[in-house]
Amino acid sequence: MKNSNVMTYVATACVVMMVVVFVTLVYESRALSYLSSDPKVCITCHTMNTHYATWQHSSHREQARCVDCHLPRDSFVNKMIAKSIDGYNHSVAMTFGTYGKNLRVTANAAERIQNNCISCHQGAVSQMHENSEHYARFDDDVSMGRRCWDCHRMIPHGRTKSLLSTPDTLGVKEFKNL
Amino acid sequence: MKSIIVIVVSVVATVLMLLLLGSIWGNKADQAMINTVPEIRELDPRSSEWGKYFPRQYDSYMATRESDDITDVLKKDPNMVVLWAGYGFSKDYNEPRGHFYMLEDNINTLRTGAPVDENSGPMPTACWTCKSPDVVRLMEEKGELEFFTGKWARWGDEIVNPVGCADCHDHETMQLSVKRDFLARALVAEGSAPFDKASHQDMRTLVCVQCHAEYYFKKTEWEDPDGQQHTAAVVTFPWDNGLAVEEIEQYYDERKFTDWTHQLSKAPMLKAQHPGYETFKTGIHGQNNLACADCHMPYVREGEVKYSDHKVGSPLDNISNTCLNCHGESEEQFKQIVERKLERKEELAASATDILAKAHFEAAKAWELGATEAEMEPALMDIRHGQWRWDFAVAAHGGFFHAPEETLRVLGTAIDKGHDARLKLRIILANYGLPEYEGPGFSSKEEAQELIGLQMEKLVDEKITFLNTLREEWIQNAATSGKNIYDPKTEVKEFKASYSDEK
């Protein structure tokens, strides 16, 4: 009886410890900030500094934030699912250091971005859509046969976007304002 | 048993979370290292000290020395000599050279005169305000009002670096920062874009606006700790009523402010400085919230590295990295479009200076014939306003591109006011029996300067004596003062001025 009392105390202490560590983890990782759409959240880790800085110098900065292109915009649920998938992948890559210095979008993210290009620039591309069956098809996954950025290669991050390409970036400094 | 399961699960979870926490802390330490900026002394005016850690930005900043041609504006349009009769600009006025030469040109221009000691010369300390990071340092060390008190020559051996890193950057974070308080005060007074709400994008303009804006020297009485009374000439942006040419004109009229009384017409004149920001904001690029840095400091690449080009100059030198970031036309088309814009402005500007110069001579003749102040006043106010508007449209140099419509509109009103003045003066001249009077002709800067009685040879001689004596002393003092403010790297090797031939 006495022994089980001790065990209960120890168990309680362990749970309390776990909760404390969990809260610390949430705080230290700024986990809750990821619910926001502020582009600065994307440079919580230094890995996106280049992407932030190049976007910040592009004409898209006045019209679209990171999430406006990179996450689905058709429904809140889809947006959160995509955010969770990306967030999980990013966390794993960050924790185990499995990313290189040249990041590329996943097939899934590329599809979302393509859809978002079209949703904003509908007027400009509607006729291309109509005619797309006559085009040579470079990429069967996309309705128009190729992706917008196969031609518009500079938009919006420019052509040099390795993690080393913008030392002393604006992104780093903006982060300090969070 | 239950307790054991709870213990095992929570310990395992805790250990895993601690490992993750360790990894996060590790990454944060990495990030802190990446974010760390080397130690630079607060407000160190020597750009080469900052350049040790930011070699690309520094090298490109130093490349502003390539913009080294002296273009004599008075030579291009001698009418300006007449427009500024009685005021320093009639002596010497060049198009701006690169940032590297700012201090040198301020010291070389005949406008700053030839002081022989710290209490002589025509200009107040305020003339240094935009030329050097040493200004910011002095304001911090001595106080703003103390800085703005006394003659220009007072700070000659303190202000020894051309505008540089410390003018726009924080020494710890390299973040953009506005170091001159009068800008923040003006934005608050104007009200449409309060300084404390400025975003990073706004800052990429506002650091430039510290200098590229219209200003005047506001006489300000103050008392030092010893009870001594002083009058400071404080750089002030006249934005209380707004940024438009009419609103600033109204600001000056309400305060009965004049920069000088015109030597010929006796009109109470205004000198527009360089209202770059005010005009830019009315143009299409300003309205789309572009920043100065977007076009004047574009990204450039060196190998894999991208950085912001600190060789601030004309974006037309680098169209493929500036205009073409957003626009689809060819470089050639761009050049033609901009050239045509410039021609349009120059056509109207030449018309305005011609009309205004004639008006000054006609007013002088009217006074000579015995016209009264009451008769002259309406015409003189038209001259004041007309010349202010012409100056506002051209003084910032880039206005024709930043805001072509506004620039041409303002020039249109300048011509209108000039004609109004001449019409009124023509009636006065007719009343005094000289209805067909025409001012004297002149065809060069030299003729115009002679006409208004400027003794150019004397001015140049005195200036050269100053450059060979007091100026040399200033450099010596700064280099040996022990304050670590002198930077030989920014010394200008080749002397160039509008009067170079005479040296």
Image (cartoon, rainbow, N blue to C red):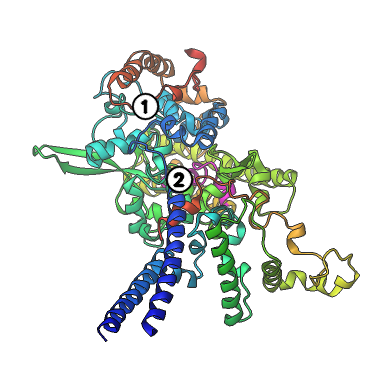
Instruction: Identify which residue, B142 or A32, lies in the foreground.
Output: A32
- Secondary structure under the numbered disc 1 in the rendered image: loop
Instruction: Identify which residue, B319 or B232, lies in the foreground.
Output: B319
- The residue pinned by badge 2 equals B208
The residues colored magenta run: B384-403
Q: Is residue B9 above or below residue B36?
A: below
Task: Name the residue at 22% across, 44% down.
Answer: B220
Q: How many marks?
A: 2
In which quadrant of the rendered image does the N terminus of chain B lie? bottom left
Place of residue A31 in the rendered image (x, y in percent of width and height, measured from the top left): 45, 69
Q: Is residue B376 left or right of residue A101?
A: left
Place of residue B417 in the rendered image (x, y in percent of width and height, measured from the top left): 48, 50
Task: Name the residue at 82% across, 66% down.
Answer: A139
Task: Specify the quadrant of the image occupied by residue B195.
Answer: bottom left
Q: Is residue B497 visible?
A: yes
Label 2 marks which chain's residue? Answer: B
Q: CA distance from mark 1 to mark 2?
A: 20 Å
Amino acid found under the numbered disc labelled 1 = Val
Q: Which of the two discs, 1 and 2, labels the residue nearer the N terminus?
A: 1
Task: Name the residue at 53% across, 54% down.
Answer: A49
- The residue pinned by badge 1 equals B160
Q: Is residue B248 above or below residue B109?
A: below
Place of residue A43 in the rendered image (x, y in percent of width and height, measured from the top left): 50, 59
- Looking at the rendered structure, which numbered label has been put on residue B437? none
Amino acid found under the numbered disc labelled 2 = Cys
Q: Is residue A64 visible?
A: no
